[in-house]
Image (cartoon, rainbow, N blue to C red):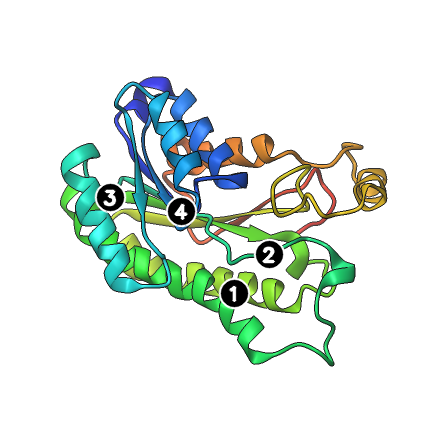
Amino acid sequence: MQKFLSDKTVLVTGAGRGLGAHIAQSFAENGSKLALNYRNSRAQAEQFVQNQNGRAGAFQADVRDALAVKKMVDAITPVLGSPDVVVHNALTDFQFNGDARSKMDQLTGDELRAHFDTGPIALLNLVQACLPGMKAKGGGQIIVIGTNLFQNPVVPYHDYTASKAALLSLVRTLCKELGQHNITINMISGGLLRTTDASAATPDEVFDFIAAQTPLGKVTTPQELADACLFFASPWARGVTGQNLIVDGGLTHA
């Protein structure tokens, strides 16, 4: 895997902090060149880049903006090469705390739109921007971060969960058009991760409850989910597309 991934340029969205930073680290440890996308977390992204011996760069762009995404990919290409792998991890500002989320009678259209803009709309922007480079290289891999909550919607994250479900639908409908260019697209769905910036507000008793319900007896870590991304970027996943891999210790099933 080391030699294979060392040939890859990997673009990770929302990579300045949280899960995105763990995903970037997993690819870096396996030899990839890293393009870290960030919206506001410039300092964290640039700190990561400083430790990568010239094999990484930090690139600011709001993934909700199609033109900004295209300009970002155009900036990445002469420095690191056009992206072979795209991991769409970016998330609108969000805290995983069910008690603080809007219930059905309070939920607004703006809250839904915020997640759809950074979810399926941003994915479309990324696919369109990266498609020419992937076609020129003869293929590529697109990995989308989802959630197990649309299998088991136990908390009222209506806006977040609906957006992730739409993302999976888009992943599956894009398969044929991307597949003819030898480009795979898959989703990885984690549960609540212990711990990221977004899940830091989750009470300890919620983590403990989830751990008790999970066959592995623990809550999935960001590193464990990040490592699963390596599979979809590897040659062992070359026959897999349009799938949703659930990485939550066996808590839910597709």
Q: Secondary structure at mark 4?
A: loop
Measure how far apart labels 4 and 2 are at the Cα level: 16 Å
| Visible residue check, residue 70 | yes
Q: Secondary structure at mark 1?
A: helix
Residue to which mark 1 is pinned? 115
Amino acid at dot 3: Gly
Amino acid at dot 1: His
Q: Residues at badges 2 and 1 in contact (C-beta under 8 Å)?
A: yes
Badge nearest the viewer, 3 or 4: 4
Q: Residues at badges 1 and 3 in contact (C-beta under 8 Å)?
A: no
Amino acid at dot 4: Thr
Residue to which mark 3 is pinned? 139
Residue at image position (69%, 37%) is: 194
Q: Secondary structure at mark 3?
A: loop
Mark 2 neighbour class, 10 Å CA radius: few under 14, some 14 to 19, many 20 or more: few
Badge nearest the viewer, 1 or 3: 1
Percent position of residue 117, x then y: 44, 67
Residue to which mark 4 is pinned? 13
Mark 1 neighbour class, 10 Å CA radius: few under 14, some 14 to 19, many 20 or more: many
Q: To which quarter of the image does residue 220 belong? A: top right
The foreground one among 27 and 102 is: 102
State which tag comes first along the sequence, 4 or 2.
4
Residue at image position (28%, 31%) is: 8
State which tag comes first along the sequence, 2 or 1.
2
Residue occupying the far front of the picture: 43
Q: To which quarter of the image does residue 245 belong? A: top right
State which tag comes first along the sequence, 1 or 3.
1
Percent position of residue 105, x then y: 74, 81
Disc number placed over residue 94 in the picture, else none: 2
